[in-house]
Image (cartoon, helix red, strand yellow):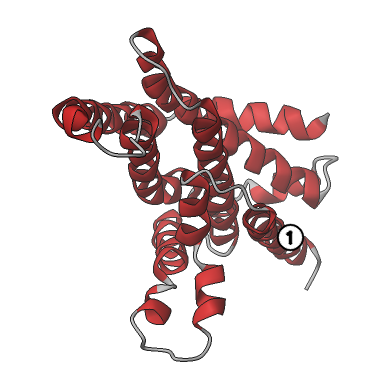
Amino acid sequence: MMVFTLALHELRRLFLSPLAWATLAVSQILLGYMFLSQVAYFLQVQSRLMGLPEMPGVTEVVAMPLFQNAAVVMLLIVPLMTMRLVADERRSHTLALLFSAPLSMTEIVLGKYLGTLAFFAIMTLLLTLMPLSLLIGGTLDLGLLAAGLLGLGLLLASFTAIGLFLSCLTQQATLAAVGSFGVLLLLWIIDWAGSSGLLAKGSEVLNYLSLLQHYQALLKGQFNSSDIIYYLLIIITFLTLSIRRLDADRLPH
């Protein structure tokens, strides 16, 4: 129960910040523009697509590229929204106050994590309304849409866990944002070394570590348990590291 109380407090704190509103507005404008561009492209090529034996529908041409672009936008936004989670508490000396509350480190970390994740869930809900609006004039592959939505949700949950951990490491929010972006970008492109032939050995490992590889599989509607396990491992690992880092802060030196 205390976890959800802290999560609600964190969500309310986020919405008290102009950064959250500005981020929400700018991201929706950008994604709305991308969505309308994809719809215009679909209408332009629709006649040519009808000649194909397996004609891709509006879900493949509009919704999945939108989700793909949304992941790139989130790659930039998540570090901005997670950088203050713990770094600000440490800088303003309120972390000790939080430690004195009747909360375990696990509850503190989960509360901050779920509160931030709720913010991204709102962003994802607004994003999902865009492709769903196409149901007014056509049909959607709802199974493929659900797979893409699941992939985006897991990706955001992983981004947030990584951002939270980087915020636990410093009292400088800017440093946390830069570090989070660096780690996320590295995990995004880590498979490039394998696909370019730079590394003859270990390319399979690099492919498995890539956030993008697992996301693309779900965008294609390929539901594989190994992709889900990968994201869960990322989330659990970075949340555990965050708990251990805060535990080390609380223990007397």
Give me the residue at 37% from left, 45% from top. Answer: 68
* Amino acid identity at mark 1: Thr
- Does residue 177 sit above or below 121 in this rendering? below
Residue 203 as seen in the image, left or right of residue 49: right
Quadrant of the image containing the C terminus: bottom right
Give me the residue at 37% from left, 34% from top. Answer: 19
Note whether residue 16 is visible. no
Residue 154 sits in which quadrant? Answer: top right
Looking at the picture, how far across and down is residue 45, in whole percent?
A: 17, 32
4 or 173, which lies in front?
4
Residue 125 as seen in the image, left or right of residue 154: left
Circle 1 packing at 10 Å, graded few (<14), some (14-19), many (20+), is some
Give me the residue at 51% from left, 91% from top. Answer: 201
80 or 248, which lies in front?
80
179 or 34, which lies in front?
34
Note whether residue 215 is visible. yes
Q: Residue furthest top?
A: 136
Which residue is identified by label 1?
240
Give me the residue at 83% from left, 47% from top. Answer: 104
Q: Residue furthest left?
A: 44
| SS for dot 1 | helix
